[in-house]
Amino acid sequence: MGDPGAGPDAAGAVRAPASHRRGGQRELDLGDLYASVEAWSAAHAKTRAQAEQLDRFKSSLGKDASDMLKALSAISDAQLQAARLAVYASLQGDETRGCGAQERRSRLRRCRR
């Protein structure tokens, strides 16, 4: 896992993920984002399903403030999860030049279209 003190410091600034050296090279510990590639894949599937459900809010956006709050909360949550997925895929792709990392970045690009 990552640095137990990772996250905002006393001043509120967010620190970068912990890193360690492997084979003479520095490697990021991405465990604070997702414990494994499998966990990333599960989160990707869940986020994609969330995003596909956002259309249900189209007909209710102008009804009242409560419906607007529900829609904006769902959109915000989906965007936050998508950003988290993208950060992991990007950082892991920087660390690992294998096909798996490229495939994860490609899956995210297809979702944005």
Image: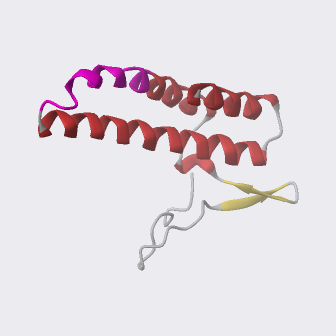
How many dots with numbers?
A: 0
User: 31 or 9, which lies in front?
Assistant: 9
Q: Which residues are magenta?
A: 49-63
Quarter of the picture containing the C terminus is: top right
Q: Is residue 26 above or below residue 73?
A: below
Question: Is residue 88 highlighted in magenta?
Answer: no
Q: Is residue 31 above or below residue 104?
A: below
Q: Is residue 24 visible?
A: yes
Residue 7 image position (x, y, % from top left): 47, 64
Q: Residue at x 42, y 20 (%)?
A: 52
Q: Residue at x 62, y 61 (%)?
A: 18
Q: Quadrant of residue 23 in the image?
A: bottom right
Q: Residue at x 13, y 30 (%)?
A: 63
Residue 43 image position (x, y, % from top left): 49, 30
User: 52 or 3, which lies in front?
Assistant: 52
Residue 102 image position (x, y, % from top left): 76, 32
Q: Quadrant of residue 77 in the image?
A: top left
